[in-house]
Image (tube, helix red, strand yellow):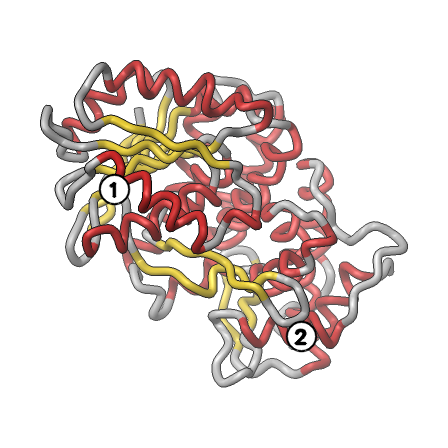
Amino acid sequence: MHRQELEFEQTRTTILIGRGLLGRAHDLLAADAGLAPETGVYLAIDSGPDGIVADRHGRLLEAALGERVGLARGTFDAVESAKSMKTVERIWDGLLDAGVDRHGLLVAMGGGIVCDVAGFAASGWMRGIDLVLVPTTLLCMVDAAIGGKTGVNRPLADGGLGKNLVGAFWPARLVICDCDVLATLGQREFRSGLAECLKHALIDGEEALGAFERDLPSVLERDPDALPDFVARSAGVKASIVRRDPRESGERALLNLGHTYAHALESKVDLGLLHGEAVALGLVAACRAARAAGLLPDHELEDRVKRLLDRCGLPSSLPAGVRVELGALRDVMRLDKKSRGGRIRLVLPRGVGRIEVVDEVSEDVVDAGWAAILTAD
């Protein structure tokens, strides 16, 4: 089992990555999340496709926790529209009905949507209660569950969604990444998580990117022996950056490589993109924008990223015939949390392991990125 620790101002996050961890949940929560016989516990569980997360993994988690007073659960459909204050209030109602006090635990099981929403609910319940995350998707294991960011979306005037416009920093006390649950993850969702893994490798450097390329065949086969090391390496990249910059006042912004473009695409809900698919497109756009900004000398990195995305089964451009209005996309980019005073900031590569935040990029640079994914060369 891999173990990583993150220190924050008022708490410590323990990240556990391995196999067979759900069956040991009681002991893990007692050791690293303060679970005691009198602790009230509320489980917020993603139902998952055909109910598989709730019915299979959720039941295993409940069985491991055993018969206890004050254990209650609610299930949620983890769709983007559910990442809302309405869902937060539903969790608060569940905590109230279960009698969970300020010494209780909110345990969220599922993908990034459930973990983000439950984390925000935990931050507000009785001015903050302890949070445990049990991610069941690859994307959540390597990214969403690490670092303390929580949030919900807000509707935009054009009918789209503003990603994570309301939220808080509320780190989990414990993150349990049981790689065995990835066996039940849908193919599209599994491949979507690889976009964040690729992003982490691009940020970390050539050694990490080489390891990503080398291990990809085994990971795509979901080799149970390969997955824990792969997940731990990718999660470790994010954890190391968060450790140095927990509040995103500097270096942590590098983790948003490709995300300004990705969030704009996700705001157009009719495109039907998963987060990782949007990130994949955003990575290509960031490489092209970097060329337009004079940060990259040629198309070598963009081509390498496209080849890796193709191997992952992820898109590097939108399907032919898809039309989006550039002005509307730029407007969403100005709402991004990295923007300042309505001026678009981008996280762009100078090369593998050389990523930087670029302030006040020109419209031509922004549009060069869009051209890379909206039209074919």
Q: Amino acid at mark 2?
A: Arg
Q: Quadrant of residue 102?
A: top left
Which comes before the other along the chain, label 1 or label 2? 1
User: Residue at point 38% right, 54% down?
Assistant: 150
* 3D distance between C-alphas at marks 1 and 2: 42 Å
User: Residue at point 64% right, 52% down?
Assistant: 278
- Report whether 230 appears left or right of 65: right
Q: Judge by depth and name the residue closer to the eye, 318 or 86.
A: 86
- Report whether 306 appears left or right of 361: right
Q: In the image, residue 88 lies at what x, y percent?
A: 39, 50
Residue 25 visible to the viewer: yes
| Disc 1 to disc 2: CB gap under 8 Å | no
When the figure is inspected, residue 222 is found, relative to residue 275, above or below; the finding is above
Residue 211 visible to the viewer: no
- Report whether 368 appears left or right of 21: right
Give the number of the disc on residue 331. Answer: none
Q: Judge by depth and name the residue closer to the eye, 88 or 136.
A: 88
Give the number of the disc on residue 330. Answer: 2
User: Residue at point 43% right, 37% down?
Assistant: 141
Q: In the image, residue 73 lies at what x, y percent?
A: 34, 29
Q: Amino acid at mark 1?
A: Leu
Q: In the image, residue 29 lies at what x, y percent?
A: 21, 28
User: Residue at point 16% right, 42% down?
Assistant: 101
Mark 1 sits on what residue? 96
When the figure is inspected, residue 311 is found, relative to residue 362, above or below; the finding is above
